[in-house]
Image (cartoon, rainbow, N blue to C red):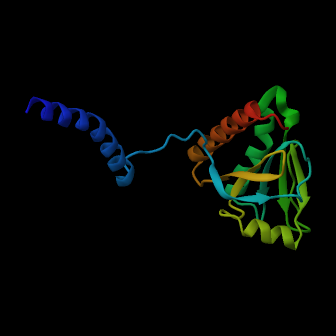
């Protein structure tokens, strides 16, 4: 009888943690730790039509008039390369505009006109023209930062974008 209790106890010690782990995972009680602040794009999107190959790029597509969100995005595009500091030459900000849009950009933003194919590519993205996209030096769109409406959320997003960019640049051997 003593041997059966010992066997049962040993079995419980090894089986119970596995069963509990399976239960926690299946019930959705475990939240994976993520360190990125942007939304990771599920499928690979190649952006060969972007200039500045070899740099990290912040891309925002302007469609129509510039509202409060757009102004926030333009401010972020202008300020984040400055905030990166000494690695400023590794980052470029690009504003994609429709043909003949009268937009003035800041000192750190490059204007690029979108053709019809590029407009379709942007429209097919998860957030379309309502987000700032982070493009790696190999022309892959990797993260999206939907531009929020509230000012406090915009500030938080800017800090998150800067944090992600610094982390990627530190870990990257490219760009």
Residue 64 seen in this snapshot: no
- In front of the other: 143 or 46: 46
Quarter residue 76 falls in: top right
Residue 1 seen in this snapshot: yes
At 80% across and 43% down in the image, what residue appears? 78
At 75% across and 61% down in the image, what residue appears? 66
- In front of the other: 131 or 167: 167
* Residue closest to the far top: 86
Judge left or right: residue 16 versus residue 67.
left
Judge left or right: residue 151 versus residue 62.
left
At 25% across and 37% down in the image, what residue appears? 11
Judge left or right: residue 67 versus residue 91.
left
Residue 59: % across, % down:
79, 52
At 32% across and 49% down in the image, what residue appears? 23
Q: Quadrant of the N terminus?
A: top left
- In front of the other: 35 or 159: 35
Residue 114: % across, % down:
87, 65
């Amino acid at each position: 009888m003593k041997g059966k209790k010992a066997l049962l106890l040993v079995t419980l010690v090894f089986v119970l943690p596995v069963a509990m782990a399976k239960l926690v995972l299946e019930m959705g009680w475990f939240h994976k730790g993520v360190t990125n602040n942007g939304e990771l794009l599920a499928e690979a999107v190649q952006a060969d039509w972007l200039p500045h190959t070899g740099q990290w790029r912040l891309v925002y597509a302007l469609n129509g008039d510039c509202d409060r969100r757009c102004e926030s995005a333009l401010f972020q595009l202008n300020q984040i390369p400055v905030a990166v500091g000494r690695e400023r030459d590794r980052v470029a900000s690009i504003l994609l505009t429709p043909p003949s849009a009268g937009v003035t950009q800041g000192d750190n933003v490059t204007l690029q006109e979108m053709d019809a194919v590029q407009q379709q590519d942007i429209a097919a993205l998860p957030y379309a023209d309502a987000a700032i996209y982070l493009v790696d030096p190999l022309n892959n769109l990797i993260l999206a930062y939907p531009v929020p409406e509230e000012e406090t959320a915009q500030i938080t997003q800017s800090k998150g974008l800067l944090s992600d960019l610094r982390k990627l640049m530190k870990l990257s051997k490219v760009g």
